[in-house]
Amino acid sequence: MDGIDDENIFLLDDELHSDTDTDISSNYLDYSSDDSCSELSSDEDLSSARIFTEIDVKNPPVPCPRFKFSGIPSVHVQFADTSDVLQFYETFIDFSLMSKIVEETNKYAKQCIQSSVARQFSKSKFWVETTVEELHVFFALNILQGIVKKPGIDHYWSKRYSTNTPFFSKIMSHRRFCLLQRYLHFSDNAAFDPQNHKCPRLVKVWPVLKHLNEKFSETVTPERDVTIDESLMLFKGRLGWKQFIPLKRARFGVKCFMLCESISGYVWSIIIYTGKDTILKPEYSKLCFSSQIVLTMMGPLLHKGYCLTIDNYYSSPELADKLVSCRTDVYGTLNLKRKEVPKEMQEKKLKKGEIIAFQRGKVTVMKWMDKKKVSLLSTIHNTEMEQIQVRSEMKEKPKIVMDYNNTMGGGNIGSYNEIKVSWIGIK
């Protein structure tokens, strides 16, 4: 799918402008199962809980406590030397994955060479089967090309004194690099069955994506605060679901959704957007696309007391209710055009520093006027304000804004260096 449709991206009108990096601690009580706001005892309770009522911001109610956290954050792999980057690389890109890539690359090269007539000066005549060790070197050179940037691949093997980078030619010849780049393959074309494959559009990279997602979740159990955000992997080739997002650094490419640990930016799970064929859990099919993304990615973490930070592309009262019923807290920016958001939130004009808020059960929605209007949703915050120092003066900001700025950064850390995937052949 080319371009952007209404469900793919919102141009945010609720932007947060943080003037401070101050760390704010959250001193909320644990929210036990016995007094869950999602568990209502009668139809009358349910009816009243579905209506937002305005909060007296001068005398706000106590914020709803967090759900009791039952997760056990930990790293499940022992590293002999945490300064050795290679250990981390080999944890995820392990021998089993590399062996699979070697097998499929050699198989694909053989198929291509046998099915075509090689020209007199064709590089294919010089093909020999690759190995795990050689592909590690090939991947390392691709990573290095993201650090040492040049206009094209040929420039890395240039012999001109002014542009020469001898490291590349010492490690691997230009011809060999081009051959590996041409025949690099991850899956068996002959074994592909479009009727039974879980995601036909991703068949070329499916073994790698599946392996990495399994490794990401097996290696780390995240801390309580997690975040979901989207990233754009630069891709300039032909692809039916390539996206154009002008606000992203890459602008053109493959959009993916990432579930990250807020404090570290560790990527715990990835979903690649492929239009209508995006892999989502069928039980959430009646919800909007963005809510399906959140609930699909959060699936293994639900009912454990996690707290999710999201932006206004995902957040809505409907999603918040669903997460609360799964003992999961959530907060973030809010699009005022979402269903069930009180009309007064959209219509009321505020002066700078003023705030208006409504509550329904455990879900609170509010609008605060800073330089621009900032609309927010939370299951653990009220309208409490905090004093912060900006340069030489003290200013007030809602606590939810401070917490959002501290936790939403996880997704940005996870996608800090956009991944260049244009060298991966979609053959």
Image (cartoon, rainbow, N blue to C red):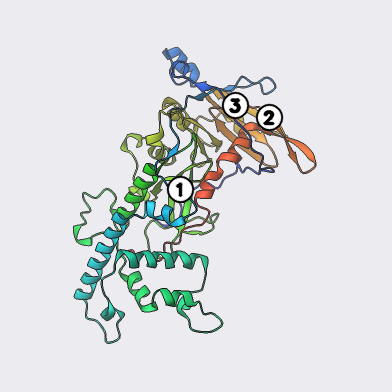
Whether residue 202 is visible to the viewer of this picture, yes or no, is no
Which element type, helix, strand or loop, lies under badge 1?
loop
- At a point 43% along the width and 27% down the height, the residue shown is 70
Q: Which residue is mark 2?
A: 385
Q: Which residue is mark 1?
A: 8
Q: Residues within 10 Å of mark 3 (few under 14, many from 20)?
A: few
Q: Which residue is mark 3?
A: 27
- At a point 58% along the width and 23% down the height, the residue shown is 63
Q: Amino acid at mark 2?
A: Met
Cα distance in 3D space between marks 3 and 2? 14 Å
Seen in the picture, residue 422 relative to 117 is either above or below; the reply is above
Cα distance in 3D space between marks 3 and 1? 35 Å
Return the residue nearer the eye: 369 or 220.
220
Tell me: 100 left or right of 412. left
Based on the displayed image, in which of its 4 quarters is residue 154 positioned?
Answer: bottom left
- At a point 44% along the width and 26% down the height, the residue shown is 327
Return the residue nearer the eye: 396 or 218.
218
Q: Residues within 10 Å of mark 1 (few under 14, many from 20)?
A: some
Based on the displayed image, in which of its 4 quarters is residue 358 positioned?
Answer: top right
Residue 383 at what x, y percent from top left?
Answer: 64, 27
Q: Earlier in the sequence, mark 1 or mark 2?
A: 1
- At a point 68% along the width and 19% down the height, the residue shown is 59
Whether residue 276 is visible to the viewer of this picture, yes or no, is yes
